[in-house]
Amino acid sequence: MNPALWGLISAASWGSADFVARISGQALGPARSLFGMIGSGILFLVIWAVATDLPLGLPTEGLHWLLINGAATMASMLLLYAGLFRGPIAVAAPLVGTYPVFVVLGGLVLGIVPTGAQWIAMAAVMAGVWMVATTGHPQTLAERPRGGVGLTVAYSLVSAISFAVAIFAAREAVPIYGDVQSVLFTRIVSFVCLLGVMTFNREAPLLPRRWWTAVTVQGGLDTLGMFTMFVGSVGGGAPLAAVGSAPVAVFTVILARIFLAERVPLKQWLGIVIVVAGVGALAYLGWQ
């Protein structure tokens, strides 16, 4: 399948997971919400590996890629949650959503150069994502958190850069370990890293039982998103898959409109149309 389509599936999965997180996350806090999500994702992956009799060997030749991927993914997600919870959302969401820019820049360093038409399509996707992410949120720049927005900006940019690092590490790990195995191993690394952070902050890794279902659904959706991103990132597809996965906010907005009856302004709908057109163009053009 074309990397942009894998990325689009990833966006749908992550956007749905973020929608669930909007319901449960405020009650649990960033670390505990992430703890439940990663833990349930690992459980799904272990069941899948056992049911399909997947080989789970751990050759040392690519072990450093798993460690980098797991640590970078955990850092990116924790900073994403912290930035969104701290706010303003209108600052955090679009800045975190710039991670494809860093992936494309990394691809250029590695000699993965898009065509002129692909540059135009990628620019359209990012412009549409920016329109969706910065429109319709109740928070504005005037509603600054204590201490200003500087810390939110820092959280969001480091989150975006960390995720770009994770994507390139996955690009190297998948050919060595396999798709599902790479997701499982890196999730375990992320889980251990998160436990270390929570221990350092003296935060108990405990979840109220009433939130188990929510974080389990969240974990399953997030794991599917990570799996499809890994598949699409192999070889020269990392930049295209990253841009294809950028419309996460689009799916979150649509789900909120359907299930929570949230109003979607005209500018947001226009951004959604631009994103769909841009991703469709990328899928048609492919990656040379």
Image (cartoon, helix red, strand yellow):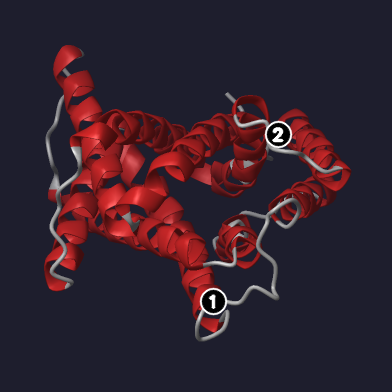
Residue 286 circle label: 2
Q: Please name the residue shown 51% across and 33% down the image.
A: 16
Q: Amino acid at mark 2?
A: Gly
Residue ID for mark 1: 145
Quadrant where the image shows the N terminus: top right
Quadrant where the image shows the C terminus: top right
Residues under numbered marks 2 and 1 in contact, where contact means CB atoms less than 8 Å apart: no
Which mark's residue is nearer the viewer, 2 or 1?
A: 1
Q: Please name the residue shown 40% across and 37% down the image.
A: 222
Q: Nearer the viewer, residue 85 or 170?
A: 85
Q: Secondary structure at mark 2?
A: loop
Is tag 2's residue or tag 1's residue first in the polypeptide sequence?
Answer: 1
Q: Where is residue 28 drawn, in percent x and y?
A: 30, 51
Above or below 141: residue 10:
above
Q: Secondary structure at mark 1?
A: loop
25 displayed left or right of 86? left
